[in-house]
Amino acid sequence: MEAIELQQLVEKALAEIRPFLESDGGNISLISIENNTVKVQLHGACVGCSVNQMTLKSGVEMTIKKYAPQITEVINIEA
C-alpha cells in the first residue's frame, strides 16, 4: 500500500472519531505515519484530560486499526 493511501485511511479514521473528541471540547490531528506507527496530537480539552491515554488506545487506535490493520501503534506527541 502506498503511503498516501495509508494516510487517507488514517484520516478517515480520525474523521470518524473527531466528533466525539469535539463534543468534549477537544480535537486530534495527524502528525506522521512512520513504520506502521501513527503519531497524532491531541488538542483542546484532550490535552490535560486524565483519560486521554485510554481514549488514545481504546478509541483512536482501535478506530485507526479498523481502517488500516497494518498500523501497530498510535502515539500522542505532546505540543
Image (spheres, rainbow, N blue to C red):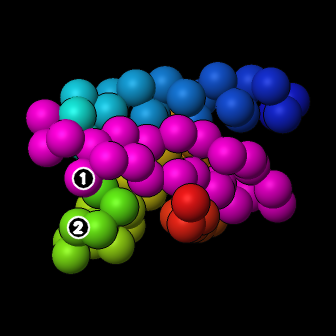
Q: Which residue is mark 2?
A: 49
Pick out the residue farthest to the right. Answer: 2
Relative side of 18 to 24, left or right: right
Residue at 43%, 42% in the rendered image: 28
Q: Which residue is mark 1?
A: 45
Q: Is residue 16 above or below residue 51?
A: above
Q: Are marks 2 and 1 in contact (CB under 8 Å)?
A: yes
State how far apart marks 2 and 1 are (Cα). Answer: 6 Å
Q: Is residue 53 above or below residue 1?
A: below
Other residues around mark 2 within 10 Å, as few (<14) / some (14–19) / many (≥20): few
SS majority, magenta:
strand
Question: Where, by quadrant of the figure, is residue 52 drawn?
Answer: bottom left
Q: Amino acid at mark 1?
A: Ala
Residue at 32%, 33% in the rendered image: 18
- Taking the magenta stretch, the answer to whether it contains residue 44 is yes
Q: Is residue 31 above or below residue 55?
A: above
Q: Position of residue 22 (x, y in %)?
A: 22, 34
Q: Secondary structure at mark 2?
A: loop
What span is colored magenta in the figure?
Answer: 23-45
Q: Amino acid at mark 2?
A: Cys
- Number of marks in the rendered image: 2
Check the picture and name the quadrant holding the N terminus. top right
